[in-house]
Amino acid sequence: MIFRSMCGGLALLCLLPILAAHAGDRVLRLGVLGFGTVAWELDTIDHYGLARSEGLDIQVRTFAGKQAAAIAFQGGQVDAIVTDLVWVARQRAVGRAIRFAPFSSTVGAIMVPAESSVQSIADLHDLKIGIAGGPLDKSWLLLRSLVQQRHGFDPETAASPTYGAPPLLQQQFARGQVDALVTFWHFAARLEAAGHRRLMDMNDVVEGLGGARDVALIGYVFAPDPDGARAEADAAFLRASRAAKALLLRDDEAWHRLRPKMRAGDDAAFGELKRRFRAGTPAAFGPPEVAAARRLFDLLATAGGTALVGEARELDTAAFHPAAFF
């Protein structure tokens, strides 16, 4: 694959040769964050030649944050990024025909210290709660909805929420500055491996609100392709992605090779990260999964209103990439 060294702006990091290989017949420009679990899959694709076998040339740009990646995507600098279904619905509602393919159904959790007296979400009253993200974080919105339904109070007003980046909140949690933490799955996995307690998994929250478990909210999102010029490249990439996931599901050696990139620390953290990643690998994607995703969007729209979903009133079935189904 061909990579050109390129830097620009404070938010955009240098282009990194994550997937270097010989040029193929098809090209896909992929924008990803400079951290996160997508890098594990991309590294696997590269190491085992899964894109090369498809005749695919993946050109990877790394970005410092989601907003920078989204701006590059909207500006036509990349063909695909990794983001969530709510953002897809918002964009489609204003006429941008972008399309989604699932990456993972692994979700975050509400964590409490090992010695905490908190036993259920009914005990969140008066606590200091850290939320990875902002007031419109999807996990936080759904948790608030469930607590209100089941226990009659809103943690946003009955507790003391604080918002921030996951690494910063992880430090505050370790120092005892927050009593509970709503965080992303890989941060929760590290805390659990260190002996802390998973108060509630976000899958349980979604199920409690009437949704289905294991919905892939995060995925690869592809730019509009009105004349079908990129159809073969999109499909080739998704086949390579599924092949990488299948390999990571069955092959422990593939994980040992990735371990230095995972920064797992000890064996417990490494094992928990591997287990959670595998658990979130979609086994299939078809009409039942589309229906479950649409139901989750409805729950989020109810919880977050227009501040979260913008002009979107539903997640239309055309939001899913034709090559995503398997």
Image (cartoon, helix red, strand yellow):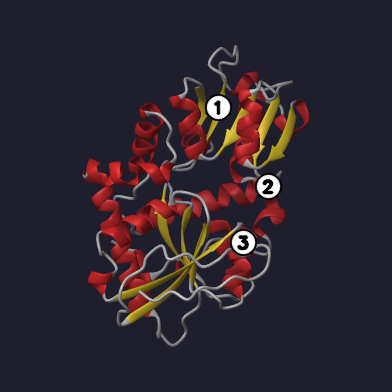
Give the SS element for disc 2: loop
Q: Earlier in the sequence, mark 2 or mark 1?
A: 1
Give the SS element for disc 1: strand
**Residue occupying image coordinates x 76% and y 26%:** 158
Comparing labels 3 and 2, the label whose residue is closer to the camera: 2
Distance from Cα at disc 1 to Cα at disc 3? 32 Å
Q: Quadrant of residue 303?
A: top right
Q: Earlier in the sequence, mark 1 or mark 3?
A: 1
**Residue occupying image coordinates x 34% and y 80%:** 26
Count of number-bearing discs: 3
**Residue occupying image coordinates x 29% and y 68%:** 51
In the picture, the quarter occupied by the N terminus is bottom left
Identify residue for label 2: 136
User: What residue type is disc 2 on?
Assistant: Leu
Q: Residues within 10 Å of mark 3 (few under 14, many from 20)?
A: some
User: What residue type is disc 1 on?
Assistant: Met
Q: Going by the image, does 321 lie left or right of 311? A: left
Identify residue for label 3: 313
